């Protein structure tokens, strides 16, 4: 059986979040199992299923070139803006 | 709704519908710790819980109609085999995985036609229970259909196992489509479902799925019944001795 990653959107949040993985024969069965394994207690209102092997992930070796250069560039954070109250979910 | 007797009749009807659910739910719960793999185990026991939940609704209603002589728990834990009126097919041992799936398919298709009719019942409570249950059944049916096709059209071994299961179960399906006196009375009052009317639809649908699954439709040369009269297979007694053990050994025990 193949491994699938499960993403859920809860009632409260706007985006799907990774909640775990499971084994299934195909996408449809994975979706069914996700329903049984991850939303039994009404944790979500939408499910995404992705085959684990389809995910391209950054590796630890990438760290120096990917992430370190950002550490000393605070000007990239727009921290001096004041957000109006009306803007939520930022 | 005519008042005379009908309260007692509905109480009995609700109890037997509860029996169907409780006994099947218990059989499914036996997969806990025994299923082929973890995901399927969680799915199967979820279905088991759906049925046990459904039994509680039916028993709760039966208790309500009993004028305080019964409770949900006394109905489940303090009646013996002869007082249980579930279909025989529900009490048969869980067998192998293919057998469980075959039984679920038979029953899921049945409920997918039975419940929409129960929603039309003149009895509001039965109608409300059916309304809730149909959503569960629609999901159960997806599962059992997919698995039947997967196993039937799968390996040689899985094909033989599920074909054998359908052969062994087929004769138990007769009972689901016949009415006893109690049900006939309630059908004429617009309360119970006339299951004779859903037999053809059930048959067409299951034959269609079996064909898709490359399975042979059993010839149906035999049929047994008795569940609705309280005549059971030897298996129900063993099931109840598990189910009722705590209450029988320590009467009145509370969690």
Image: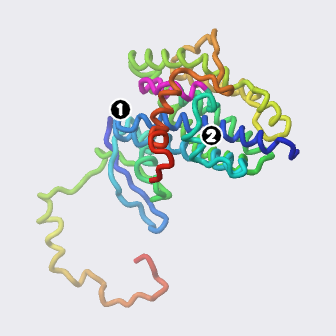
- Where's residue A56, x and y in %? 26, 51
Quick check: B110 above or below B39? Answer: above
Q: Quadrant of residue A19?
A: bottom left
Magenta-drawn stretch contains B15: no
Residue beneath label 1, please?
A: B36
Q: Which residue range is magenta in the image?
A: B88-102
Q: Nearer the viewer, mark 2 or mark 1?
A: 2
- Where's residue B102, x and y in %? 52, 25
Quick check: B193 above or below A53? Answer: above
Quick check: B86 above or below B217? Answer: below
CA–CA distance in space, label 2 to label 1: 28 Å
Q: Residue at x 79, y 41 (%)?
A: B191
Q: Residue at x 30, y 46 (%)?
A: A52
- Where's residue B71, x and y in %? 62, 49
Residue beneath label 2, please?
A: B18
Quick check: B71 above or below B216? Answer: below
Q: Nearer the viewer, residue B48 or B81?
A: B81
Q: Residue at x 54, y 43 (%)?
A: B52
Q: Main secondary structure of the magenta part?
A: helix
Q: Residues within 10 Å of mark 2 (few under 14, many from 20)?
A: many
For the rendered model, the colour scheme is rainbow
Q: Helix, strand, or loop for circle 2?
A: helix
Q: Earlier in the sequence, mark 2 or mark 1?
A: 2
Q: Nearer the viewer, residue B213 or B63?
A: B63
- Chain bearing tag 2 is B
């Amino acid at each position: 059986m193949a491994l699938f990653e499960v993403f859920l959107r809860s009632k409260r949040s706007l985006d799907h979040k990774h909640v775990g993985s499971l084994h299934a024969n195909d996408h449809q069965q994975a979706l069914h199992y996700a329903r049984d394994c991850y939303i039994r207690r009404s944790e979500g209102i939408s499910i995404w299923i992705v085959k684990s092997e389809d995910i391209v992930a950054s590796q630890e070796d990438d760290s120096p070139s990917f992430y370190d250069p950002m550490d000393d560039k605070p000007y990239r954070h727009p921290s001096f803006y004041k957000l109006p109250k009306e803007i939520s979910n930022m | 709704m005519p008042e005379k007797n009908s309260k007692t009749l509905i109480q009995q009807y609700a109890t037997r519908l509860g029996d169907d659910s409780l006994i099947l739910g218990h059989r499914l719960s036996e997969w806990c710790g025994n299923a082929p793999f973890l995901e399927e185990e969680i799915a199967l026991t979820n279905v088991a819980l759906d049925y046990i939940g459904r039994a509680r609704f039916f028993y709760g209603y039966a208790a309500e109609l009993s004028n305080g002589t019964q409770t949900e728990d006394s109905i489940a834990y303090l009646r013996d085999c002869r007082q249980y009126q579930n279909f025989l097919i529900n009490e048969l041992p869980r067998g192998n995985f293919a057998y469980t799936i075959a039984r679920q398919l038979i029953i899921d298709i049945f409920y997918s036609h039975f419940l929409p009719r129960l929603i039309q019942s003149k009895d509001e409570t039965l109608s409300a229970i059916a309304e809730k249950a149909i959503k569960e059944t629609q999901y159960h049916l997806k599962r059992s259909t997919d698995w039947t096709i997967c196993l039937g059209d799968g390996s040689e071994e899985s094909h033989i196992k599920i074909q054998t299961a359908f052969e062994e179960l087929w004769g138990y399906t007769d009972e689901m489509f016949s009415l006893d006196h109690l049900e006939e009375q309630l059908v004429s009052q617009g309360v119970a479902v006339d299951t004779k009317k859903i037999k053809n639809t059930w048959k067409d649908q299951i034959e269609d799925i079996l064909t898709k699954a490359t399975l042979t439709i059993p010839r149906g040369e035999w049929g047994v019944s008795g569940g609705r009269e309280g005549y059971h297979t030897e298996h129900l007694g063993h099931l109840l001795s598990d189910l009722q053990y705590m209450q029988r050994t320590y009467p009145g025990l509370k969690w």
